Amino acid sequence: MVGFILASHGDFAEGIYSSAKMVFGEAEELQTVTFHNGETLDDLRGNLLKAVGKLSDQENVLFMVDLFAGSPYNQAFQLCAEHPGWAIVTGLNLPMLAQAYGDRDMATAGEIATDLVGAAREGIVTHPEEFMPKDAAPAAASGGATAGAIPPGTVLGDGHIKYVLARIDTRLLHGQVATAWTKQVQPTRIIVCSDGVAHDELRKTMIEQAAPPGVKANVVPISKIIEVAKDPRFGDTKAMLLFETPQDALKAIEGGVDIKEINVGSMAHSNGKVAVNQVLSLGKEDVATFDKLKSLGVKFNVRKVPTDSPEDMDALVEKARAELK
């Protein structure tokens, strides 16, 4: 596995890794190196070597640094001259780091460095979009079939939409979903299934704009995803479904959406609910809904991000049931 070294002036390297852990979870084989006033270049070089020494594979190392030609870059450059398997990429930002997380299956540090450049650039957008330079505007997402442009009755693929992930998450489409989970399951389309959000133009627009590059996001009412599930024009679509509540997921499944497993990500606390872990709060209606979903044969995968260890949904439901008596 390629080892990562994040290096920066000041505490930026530690700060961005802290943000990454919040959004994507812990990363294996990653070290941070900071360079502060009063430290010498020899100190910096020594700290870079100490960080490399903590990695399992010290022949395959990628440095992600803040500034081209800055001290962290210059010292890493000198070290790379002595180690052909090492590489550097500059301009460290969060989209770059997210891409690096997903590129761990690549063979070399150099191959990952090449791939990170595009991710770092695509992570820079403006709002309104007209402020983007014309040569830097985001590429249009392909996103699978656009059913409105295809005659009704057309069969694409095998005629059945593929659900690569169905997730319950109060926050719907946010950083952990748009990066970590998208990298994990690789959908062509993200579909937020919510009656409330579908009729809220501001939230709808924000969600559609939050889609990662190359993936189209749609917001539809529950009745629409039930229609889509039966529409053969979506046969070549790999969909990630996002539900705000377990009740919405149940309504979709009872309407014919063939979901076998649900990723339970986060459910916000409110009056009448009890916290069963750090990110899940359940009320009596939620307990009854999860009972119903289980009776329909639905499996549960309780994880905030792909790197988390799964929790036992049955135990969490029973905990809520006991506390809500």
Image (cartoon, grey):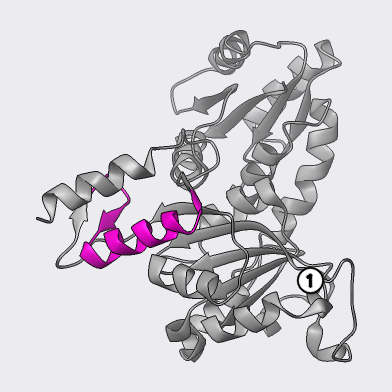
Name which residue type carries label 1: Ala
Q: Is residue 295 within the magenta segment?
A: yes
Give the x, y percent position of residue 181: 60, 50
Give the x, y percent position of residue 227: 66, 83
Q: Residue at left 65%, top 38%?
A: 101
Please identify the residue farthest to the front as the structure is shown. Answer: 295
Q: Is residue 92 visible?
A: no
Read off the magenta span.
276-299
Rendered position, 15 above or below 192: above
Q: Nearer the viewer, residue 103 or 251?
A: 251
Q: Residue at left 44%, top 53%?
A: 264
Rendered position, 41 above or below 191: above
> What residue would you read off at disc 1?
141
Q: Residue at left 13%, top 56%?
A: 324
Q: Is residue 136 visible?
A: yes
Secondary structure beneath disc 1?
Answer: loop
